[in-house]
Amino acid sequence: MTPDGEVTNDAEWSDTEKKEILLGLNCGKSPPYLRAWVWAKNDNHSLYMLLKIEHFKSLQYDLEDQAFIYYLWSEATTIWDRSDAAWAYQLSSPSDLCGLTGSTWTHDTVAGGSNDAQGSGYYDTLFYWFEIVKALDTGDGCDWALELGDTIGAGNPTQTTDLLYVGILDDSSGNRIENGITLTLSPPQRTLTPVGGILEPNTPNLQGLALMAIITALVSFIALKQLRR
């Protein structure tokens, strides 16, 4: 697939299911709430993610609005001391980031690593569409190191490690509208039934893909009720 932010053909995302989540401020707990849909898969080497994010008029559109995935974890303590992120933009090249301090990230290229992120996005007047590709293990010391069977993001907001977030940065306000997800890397064991739009036809897993990513959204019932009102 080409990480251009678009579903460029019927088969590109037909081998994985989409999951609906709810994004918000304060790790998804506070408005404005945005519905989002996530597709994820991998091919033994990289994680591929498609984000479709609803746009509300209360959220000012900006060409600098950008999508992200980031992970906070710990190697030696109970408080996260490692961080990794991939940022995708509508106009510029993607960023591979690490070393989160407060709200500031460091580019991998500055920290001695390399930029191993790919991605892009666009806005179709109703939704943002972003595709992000990030290597599972670059070995450059600045990124996560994932392998088959790993589950990441299983922590919760009251904990201080193993937190995985996806969302969008509203450039006009500087706010991250996000929520936590849990992602498990596993090999394909069955034919999935794709859902939604051009992904509806039943198609077998693409032979070039050896792994799938299963996403479970960590969305509170309170937030869901807010959305339905």
Image (cartoon, rainbow, N blue to C red):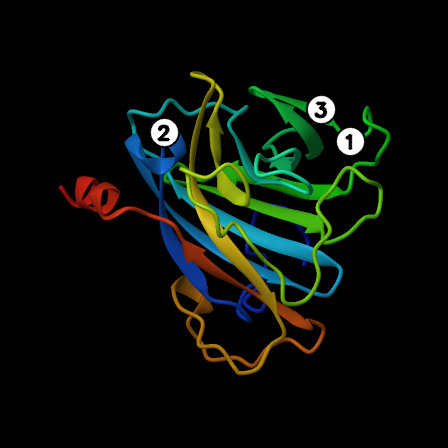
Residue 82 horizontal side relative to residue 228, left or right = right
C-alpha span from label 2 to label 3: 23 Å
Q: Residue under circle 2? A: 25
Total of numbered circles in the picture?
3
Secondary structure category for the residue under label 3: strand
N-term-proximal mark, 2 vs 1: 2
Secondary structure category for the residue under label 2: helix
Task: Specify the label residue 108 is tagged with.
Answer: 1
Amino acid type at image mark 1: Asp
Graded by Cα atoms within 10 Å as few (under 14), some (14 to 19) or many (20 or more), the crowding at tag 3 reads some
Residue 175: where, in percent of width, then height?
Answer: 44, 22
Graded by Cα atoms within 10 Å as few (under 14), some (14 to 19) or many (20 or more), the crowding at tag 1 reads many
Q: Quadrant of residue 210?
A: bottom right
Is any atom of residue 43 visible in this view?
yes
Residue 165: where, in percent of width, then height?
Answer: 50, 41
**Residues at marks 1 and 3 touching, judged by CB atoms closer than 8 Å:** yes
Residue in the foreground of this view, choosing between 13 and 197: 13
Is any atom of residue 93 visible in this view?
no
Residue in the foreground of this view, choosing between 139 and 65: 139
Task: Specify the label residue 106 is tagged with.
Answer: 3
